[in-house]
Amino acid sequence: MEQVDFNIGYDIEPEKVDAFAAEVWERACEMESAINSEKQGVARLLENGDHAVKWRFCYWLKNIYGLYDARFAVNRAANEVAREQGITLATPTTHEVVLKKEQKVG
């Protein structure tokens, strides 16, 4: 079994994450033959974090030598599907640095 973790916002319902994972798995299988297309990939809630829910997408390989290519295919598919379904995978900005203009004395 192989896995990839995704941080997804709290505003996305678990059912939508399941649909996202199913589409990611289907596309990744089309892209990479090392992924076992006979065993459905699944999304599992891993952690409720401070800014997002961490979901683990699990999938199985037919060929361990295709591990990196499979991981790249899953990440590529996830990026495409997230854009199409309006799911943001980005890490939130937690702070901002404000620089002030230097004041002249005199």
Image (cartoon, rainbow, N blue to C red):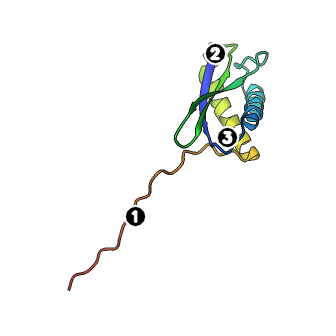
Q: Which residue is mark 3?
A: 79
Amino acid type of the residue tagged 2 in the rendering: Met
- x and y, in percent, of residue 91 in the image: 54, 45
CA gap, disc 1 and disc 2: 45 Å
Please tell me whether mark 2 sits on a helix, a strand or a loop.
loop
Dot 3: few (<14), some (14–19), or many (≥20) neighbours within 10 Å?
some
Quarter of image, res 104: bottom left
Q: Tell me which numbered mark, 1 or 3, is placed earlier along the sequence.
A: 3
| Local SS, label 3 | helix
Image quarter of residue 9: top right
Left or right: where does residue 75 sit relative to residue 33?
Answer: left
What numbered label is drawn on residue 98?
A: 1
Among the two numbered marks 3 and 2 on one chain, the one whose residue lies closer to the N terminus: 2
How far apart are labels 3 and 2 at the CA level? 21 Å
Left or right relative to 22: residue 73: left
Question: For the image shown, how many numbered marks are present on the structure?
Answer: 3
Q: In x, y percent, where is residue 13?
A: 72, 39
Mark sitting on residue 1: 2
Q: Position of residue 90 (x, y in %)?
A: 58, 45
Count residues near mark 2 (Cα–Cα under 10 Å), then give few for <14, some for 14-19, many for 20+.
Answer: few
Give amino acid for label 1. Val
What's the amino acid at mark 3?
Answer: Asn
- Of badges 1 and 3, nearer the viewer stands 1
Which residue shows up at 77% across the image and 19% down it?
37
